[in-house]
Image (spheres, rainbow, N blue to C red):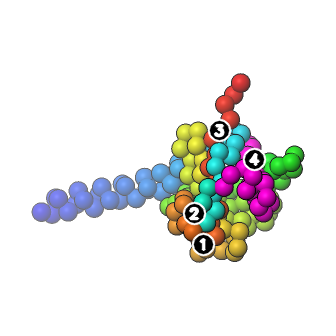
Amino acid sequence: MCRFTFVVVALALIALPLRADDKATAGERDMKALQGKWLVTGAFRDGKKLSDDERNKDDASFFLEGLVIEKDNLKLNFKPNDAIDWYFELDTSVTPHVVKFGQQNDKKVLAIYRVEGDKLSLAFTLKEAEDRAKLPAKLETKSGDGVYLFEFEREKKK
């Protein structure tokens, strides 16, 4: 029994640093996976997918056409021919993962995200966008929740 307890404790001590490394690796893995040009394939609000016409009539955030990510720089491309250059940082220590973006020394806007291969999803609220407690718990939106959800696909190289 004593030997079994020792083995369990030893394995736990070995696994703890590995978990910390996994989180650091997750951030590096996500940062690498996010690099490139992303095009909006879907925009949702309050549980409803919005058509391009609805997006064009709606508030400015729905004019978003795509993102270009290079290192920790994020360029948001809006219609018509408008762009914002921001910086971002990732927090992969929580689930869902969180991205914080804004000016280089003033990253305040929070969103949750998931990147899987050539697909990226971002969800956020515009109201109280700086409050981590107000972030959506899942990458989804429901009627009346005020959550914005964008789906992107990586632009294919020509």
Q: Secondary structure at mark 4?
A: strand
- Position of residue 30 measured from the top left corner of the image (x, y, whole percent): 58, 47
- Which of the two marks, 2 or 4, is nearer to us in this view? 2
Q: Are marks 2 and 1 in contact (CB under 8 Å)?
A: yes
Q: Earlier in the sequence, mark 3 or mark 4?
A: 4
Q: From this view, report whether residue 139 is shown above or below residue 146.
A: above
- Which of the two marks, 4 or 1, is nearer to us in this view? 1
Left of 37 or right of it: where is 81? right
Residue 32 in magenta? Answer: no
Q: Secondary structure at mark 3?
A: strand
Residue type of the residue flagged with mark 2: Gly
Q: Which residue is mark 3?
A: 154
Q: Earlier in the sequence, mark 2 or mark 4?
A: 2
Q: Start and end of the magenta stretch?
A: 50-74
Residue type of the residue flagged with mark 3: Arg
- Position of residue 66 measured from the top left corner of the image (x, y, whole percent): 73, 46
The residue shown at (71%, 39%) is 37
Residue type of the residue flagged with mark 1: Gly
**In the depicted view, which residue is nearer to us: 70 or 19?**
70
- How far apart marks 1 and 3 lie (CA) works out to 30 Å
**In the depicted view, which residue is nearer to us: 138 or 63?**
63
- How far apart marks 3 and 4 lie (CA) works out to 12 Å
Which of the 4 image quadrants contains residue 143? Answer: bottom right
- Whether residue 90 is visible to the viewer of this picture, yes or no, is no
Q: Earlier in the sequence, mark 2 or mark 1?
A: 2
Q: Which residue is mark 1?
A: 144
Query: In which quadrant of the rendered image does the C terminus lie?
Result: top right
The residue shown at (23%, 56%) is 7
Q: Which residue is mark 4?
A: 65
Q: Residues within 10 Å of mark 4 (few under 14, many from 20)?
A: many
Residue type of the residue flagged with mark 4: Glu
Q: Which mark is residue 47?
A: 2
